[in-house]
Amino acid sequence: MFSYSDNDLYCEQVALADLAAHVGTPAYVYSSQTILANYRAYDEAFGALPHTVCYAVKANSSLAVLALLAKAGAGFDIVSGGELARVLAAGGDASRVVFSGVGKTAAEVEYALGHGIHSFNCESEPELVLLDAMAARRGVKAGFSIRVNPDVDAATHPYIATGLGQHKFGIAIERARAVYERARGYTNLSAEGVSCHIGSQILDASPILEAVDKLVSLAQRLRAESCPIRHLDLGGGLGISYRPGEKAPAVAQFVEGLCDRLANAGLSVIVEPGRSIVGPAGMLLTRVLYRKQNGAKEFIVVDAAMNDLIRPALYHAHHEIVPLRKSGLPPVTADVVGPICESGDFLARDRMMANAMPGDYLAVCAAGAYGFVQSSNYNSRPRAPEVLVEGAGYRVIRQRETYLDLMRGETV
């Protein structure tokens, strides 16, 4: 829902240059129509196959974004007690929440049990011991899936790959049957499903489908051994287009591949998309402060920095950077850098882009996922506001932090 009209970049029906002038920069802006369209693409593609689309909260945990998805009927995939608190505050249904993550604490498990979440994706046998003990304390049975590691290469950045034997996540698939068998001894646990997630920003869906084949085979063997598996949790990981010409898998085609493999399995399915729902729906708006040269090197200094969007510095991630108003000037090759006192503070390097001048506004594209949620106060910089566009209007869904916010909770 981002497009140009008469040289102005719009989000839905809102001119982003006008929005930036009103709320200031840096600022995150999200399209509500895009978020809902991306969620519904998953939900509708499954058709009659029993399914739950559990949005991965870690991608973007803004309360307004969560509330938008909750009203649309989404479930939620969480990885911390804090994310559960956000889901509940946004009106999410705890019975449609799955709790993933390799390091759940006793307090987090107790909090989740107290709110009656759907199930836990467990990643080790000690975690099963903890879950059983906490469920016994509350006098309940906790539904769980074991997250299996299928040893499938997701062919993505090593920091966001999770499906190989060298990674910290999950239990090796060849050990899973024995773990499920031992789990029968835990009287306060109920084996509900099998879980898997092999990584993020996956542009070729074939590794996910390979992992699904392995999960279906495992689930069938478990059921033959009287383990009452009811669902498969297939995780998320579908990538989006960050670069021109980079083709992301079509959601409908991807889900069709899943349905083909699950049609006769007699299992319901859970998927946990995050990036593919909110990533294309967000932009980081920034203003040019200075232009400078060091020898032959050209720099565009902007007011957004690595504390606002760390992905380029952390992952060498590419985000397109476009002007909010086209100027007609010839393009320039430059580094786009921020005010942080680190050489790693950049949004783009050696990028051919619009020839922006001091005072001009720029948009860092596809920043709706893993943008604000990874931001920080490094260099004592207040975090940016978040803005949700709804048709011809918009509202600030998180206020810009103040200097007082930076010191909240501290004492001399």
Image: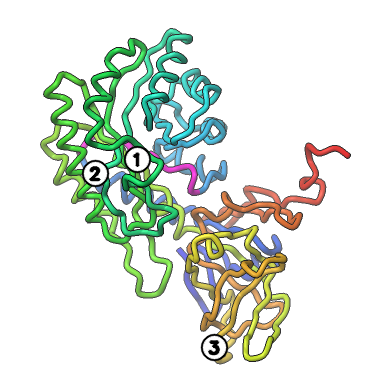
Q: Quadrant of residue 379?
A: bottom right
- Residue 53's tag is 1
Residue type beneath disc 1: Val
N-terminal label among 3 and 1: 1
Q: CA distance from mark 2 to mark 3?
A: 44 Å
Residue 50 covered by magenta stretch: yes
- Residue 191, compared with residue 267, is above or below; it is above
Q: CA distance from mark 2 to mark 1?
A: 10 Å
User: Which segment is the magenta one?
Assistant: 48-59
Q: From the viewer's perspective, tell me whether residue 318 is left or right of residue 223.
A: right
Measure the C-alpha gap from mark 3 to mark 1.
42 Å
Residue 29 lies, in percent from the top left, at: 57, 58
In the rendered image, which quarter is residue 177 located in? top left
Packing grade of label 2 (10 A; few <14, some 14-19, many >=20) is: some
Crowd rating for badge 1 (residues with CA inside 10 Å; few <14, some 14–19, many 20+): many
Q: Are marks 2 and 1 in contact (CB under 8 Å)?
A: yes
Residue 35 x/y as whole percent: 44, 52
User: Is 150 placed above or below 123 here?
Assistant: below
Viewer-side residue, 175 vs 26: 175
Tell me if mark 3 has few (under 14), some (14-19) or many (20+) residues whose alpha carbon lies within 10 angstroms of its own: few
271 left or right of 366 in image: left
Say whether disc 2 or disc 3 marks the residue closer to the N-terminus: 2
Asked if the stretch drawn in magenta spans residue 181, the answer is: no
Residue 13 spot, x, y in % from top left: 52, 64
Q: Which residue in the structure is indicated by mark 2?
A: 46
**Residue 284 at what x, y percent from top left?**
58, 63
